[in-house]
Image (cartoon, helix red, strand yellow):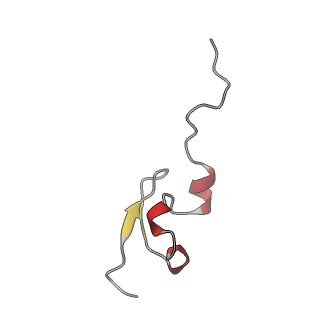
Amino acid sequence: MPANLPSKICEVCGLPFNWRKKWKKNWDEVKYCSEKCRKNKKSTSSGSEII
């Protein structure tokens, strides 16, 4: 396994993850380490605020 792969920190779980071949074309847009984290991303407002 190559040692010089770029890595990022997942915006949801906070864990580091490395570049993967499937992200070759859009690495700059990748924010989440997994599909699970992408689905559980923090929503800013769900529209159910109590006033």
Query: What residue lies at 58% left-to-right and 39% top-to-bottom?
Result: 43
Q: Residue furthest front?
A: 25
Query: What residue lies at 63% left-to-right and 52% top-to-bottom?
Result: 39
Q: Residue furthest top?
A: 51
- Please name whichever residue, 2 or 26, is drawn nearer the observer in this view of the structure: 26
Quarter that holds the C terminus: top right
Q: Residue furthest left?
A: 4
Position in image of residue 2 (x %, y %) = 37, 87
Position in image of residue 22 (x %, y %) = 55, 77
User: Quick check: 10 above or below 26?
Assistant: above
User: Quick check: 16 above or below 12?
Assistant: below
Position in image of residue 23 (x %, y %) = 52, 73
Position in image of residue 44 (x %, y %) = 55, 35
Query: What residue lies at 39% left-to-right and 63% top-to-bottom?
Result: 8
Quarter that holds the N terminus: bottom left
- Please name whichever residue, 24 or 20, is drawn nearer the observer in this view of the structure: 24
How many numbered callouts? 0
Q: Residue furthest right?
A: 48
